[in-house]
Image (tube, grey):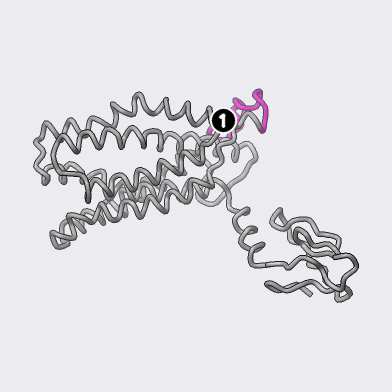
Amino acid sequence: SRPGVGRECLPGRGNTVPRVAGPAFPPETPCGCPGRGGVWDGGASRCSYKHDMTRFSIAAYATQIHPLHYAKTWYFVSFAGYACMTPYLPLFYEKWGLTRTEIGAVNALKPLVSFVATPAWGWVADYTGKHNALFFWKTVSQGLGYCALGFFVPKHFTNVFVYIFFLETTCAATMTLADAATGTMCRRASSKNEKPWGGNTYGEIRLWGAVSWGFLFGPAMGAALTYLPTTLANHAPFVVYPIFLAASAATTLGFDFTPFSEEFGDGDIGDAGLGGDGGD
């Protein structure tokens, strides 16, 4: 009989759990139980390991999610947050009393800072090998940072300019990390002829972000800012944005940053191709 949650395996009662396809369950132990530590306890009457089948079920589900599904979710949720914030920031700057010239200066910070900070952060990620941890930290920092901009930063040009400078320096390379990992995962999936639902090419993955921004959350936030009471409208983007990016941060832990060459050899990199057609 299959052990239940928290039950102990008793000898002599047919305690062999059927094998499950795939890598979800650990190898069977001497007592026939699919778990660690399931050994006879010095000839005692029962197995020394208490099996939690719920834990194994969760682990099985997590290991069966294709890495590209994490990428699709990241683009969808992240661009939902961007759509609720980025297009409307200049309007908030104007409400805060910034002139058109000052608004232009603040908006110019992101590309100018990214020009230097993005390759620097890329080097840090490659040098430390902590791509997922850095990706997670940057996504969380970006969500909390823009939330703080709306609630805590004094609404004067100097304060906003300096704050955005440091915020963009901290959060630079977030999109670059996502794009780099997604490209690698797409090449790996194509080389293995894996076809997860929703696409296995870079364009198909990024399409999830475009749908999220252009068809769903961009228009939804525009309608909210138009029809909500002024008090709610003034805070809506700065509340919704960190919520979306918190969900986005959770998906960063499922990205696979393993270099493609480590699995298939340097000679096979060019043969796989981004489009997955074998590079003929």
Where does residue 138 sit, x and y in percent of width and height? 41, 40
Tell me the element at label 1.
loop
Quadrant containing the N terminus is: bottom right
Horizontally, residue 58 falls left or right of residue 34, namely: left
The residue under label 1 is which amino acid type? Answer: Gly
Residue 38 position in % (x across, y down) = 80, 62
Residue 143: x and y in percent read 34, 47
* Residue toward you, 49 or 169: 49
Residue identifier under label 1:
273
Membership of 268 in magenta stretch: yes
The image shows residue 24, relative to residue 177, as above or below, that is below
Closest to the observer, 265 or 175? 175
Q: Quadrant of residue 155?
A: top left
Q: Residue at x 36, y 49 (%)?
A: 211
Task: Using residue 280 as the reference point, say whether residue 23 is left or right of it.
Answer: right
- Residue at left 28%, top 26%? 112
| Nearer-the-camera pick, 214 or 84 | 84
x then y, percent, for residue 193: 63, 41
Callout 1 crowding tier (Cα within 10 Å): few <14, some 14–19, many ≥20: some
Q: Is residue 31 above or below residue 4?
A: above
Q: In this view, does 242 lie above or below 274?
A: below
Residue under the point 9% across and 42% down = 97
Q: Quadrant of the C terminus?
A: top right
Number of marks: 1
The residues colored magenta run: 263-280
